[in-house]
Image (tube, rainbow, N blue to C red):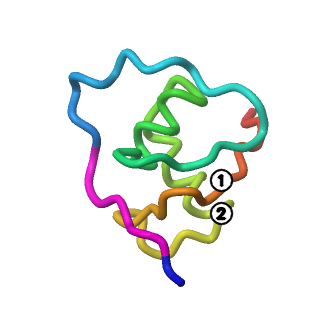
């Protein structure tokens, strides 16, 4: 059964979330690729790399509970 998608970006009031460490991250309600990239890499523009690496065809739809690969970027 498909999981509920989370669409759109997180509001700027939620930017104080803790940094993401490790090589994977499980999506929670309210996440966006931009926000995940900011927390994991310190730069939201890396969202495109996350989409490519994780084979995400529609970056506006992230499914809660999905585990994303977070490779080290040079």
Using a 10 Å C-alpha cutoff, classify the residue at mark 1 as few (fewer than 14 neighbours), some (14 to 19) or many (20 or more): many
**Residue 50 location, x and y as percent?**
59, 52
> Taking 63 as reference, is 26 above or below it?
above
Residue depicted at x 40% and y 45%: 31
Task: Judge depth for marks 1 and 2 and give the one in front.
Answer: 1
**Residue 52 location, x and y as percent?**
61, 63
Tell which of 41 and 67 is nearer to you: 67
User: Is residue 6 one of those drawn in magenta?
Assistant: yes
User: Is residue 74 one of those drawn in magenta?
Assistant: no
The label number, if any, that marks residue 68 in the structure image: 1
Using a 10 Å C-alpha cutoff, classify the residue at mark 2 as few (fewer than 14 neighbours), some (14 to 19) or many (20 or more): few
> Taking 13 as reference, is 73 above or below it?
below
Mark 1 in CB contact with mark 2 (< 8 angstroms): yes
Residue depicted at x 26% and y 54%: 8
> Taking 2 as reference, is 22 above or below it?
above
Q: CA distance from mark 1 to mark 2?
A: 6 Å
Q: Secondary structure at mark 2?
A: loop
Q: The magenta stretch spans which residues?
A: 3-9
Return the residue found at the far front.
1
Q: Could you tell me how many numbered marks the image carries? A: 2
Tell which of 55 and 30 is nearer to you: 30
**Residue 74 location, x and y as percent?**
75, 33
Residue depicted at x 60% and y 60%: 66
Q: Earlier along the polypeptide chain: callout 1 or callout 2?
A: 2
Answer with the quarter of the image where residue 40 lies. top right
Tell which of 22 and 1 is nearer to you: 1
Return the residue found at the far bottom.
1
Residue depicted at x 45% and y 49%: 33
Q: Quadrant of the N terminus?
A: bottom right
**Residue 23 location, x and y as percent?**
78, 39
Q: Which residue is mark 2?
A: 54
């Amino acid at each position: 059964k498909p999981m509920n998608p989370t669409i759109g970006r997180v509001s700027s009031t939620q930017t104080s979330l803790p940094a993401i460490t490790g090589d994977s991250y499980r999506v929670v309600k309210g996440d966006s690729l931009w926000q995940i990239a900011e927390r994991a890499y310190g730069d939201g523009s890396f969202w495109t790399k996350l989409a490519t690496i994780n084979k995400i065809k529609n970056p506006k739809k992230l499914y809660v509970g999905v585990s994303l690969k977070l490779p080290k970027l040079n």
